[in-house]
Amino acid sequence: MGETNKNLWAPWRLEYVKSLSGESSDGCFLCRYAETPEKDRDNLVIWRTDRCFALFNRFPYANGHLLIAPLAHRPELHDLDEPTLHELICLTRDAQRLVRAATGCHGSNVGMNFGKCAGAGLPGHLHMHVVPRWEGDINFMSVLSDTRVIPQSFEALREAMAEAIGQLGLPPLRG
Ligand SMILES: [Zn+2]
């Protein structure tokens, strides 16, 4: 449990990190998803703009964990032009709002990791995390150590999101 306390992301993300093959765009799942909009439903992509997209994290830290990324394979914020940065933060804003409405979470973490030392599982393709949080979830996690509990399937959560979108006036989900 010591490692869990030192590095919030590591134990759950091991499988995810193992599934990646380095920093080249060849092995980058975000590039693969970005290039196949016809598979958005299977790839758990929920939104696209001209330059960015939003999707479920297949290896979520919590139920409803979303990723927002540029379509282009870029490692750093300073590699993005102004319109891309604008779309990235606007999608993040909408994703945070959607996650809150669809999951009933009490709060959220929104953030980015740059470089492997900072916890980035995919350092070549920057991405924003939106992670819903509940009062007391840290205590719950530390009791269970590295066991994840994801109570709602992606499909069920997608339905909750579709419903919330109608109420919030956000763009419709892909697929
Ligand atoms: Zn990429």
Image: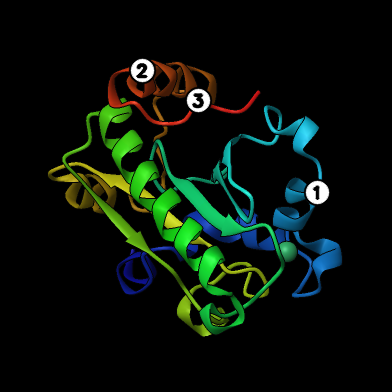
Classed neighbour count for the residue bearing mark 1: other residues with Cα under 10 Å, few (<14), some (14–19), many (≥20): few
Percent x, y of residue 33: 74, 46
User: Do callouts 2 and 1 mark residues in contact (Cβ within 8 Å)?
Assistant: no
Classed neighbour count for the residue bearing mark 2: other residues with Cα under 10 Å, few (<14), some (14–19), many (≥20): few
Name the N-terminal-most of marks 3 and 1: 1
| Badge 1 amino acid | Glu
Where, by quadrant of the figure, is residue 165 drawn?
A: top left
Q: Which circle, 3 or 1, is nearer the viewer?
A: 3
Residue with the mark numbered 2: 166
Classed neighbour count for the residue bearing mark 3: other residues with Cα under 10 Å, few (<14), some (14–19), many (≥20): few
Where, by quadrant of the figure, is residue 71 drawn?
A: bottom right
Residue drawn at x 81%, y 68% is 25
Task: Determine the CA span between mark 2 and mark 3.
Answer: 8 Å
For the residue pair 142 and 79, the one nearer the viewer reads as 79
Percent x, y of residue 86: 45, 62
| Residue 167 vertical position relative to residue 3 in the rendered view, above or below | above
For the residue pair 173 and 159, the one nearer the viewer reads as 173
Quarter the N terminus occupies? bottom left
Task: Determine the CA span between mark 3 and mark 1.
Answer: 20 Å
Secondary structure type for disc 1: loop
Residue with the mark numbered 1: 35
Query: Could you say which disc has been placed on residue 172 in the image?
Result: 3
Quarter the C terminus occupies? top right
| Residue 171 vertical position relative to residue 107 in the rendered view, above or below | above
| Badge 2 amino acid | Gly
| Badge 3 amino acid | Pro
Residue drawn at x 51%, y 53% is 68
Name the N-terminal-most of marks 2 and 1: 1
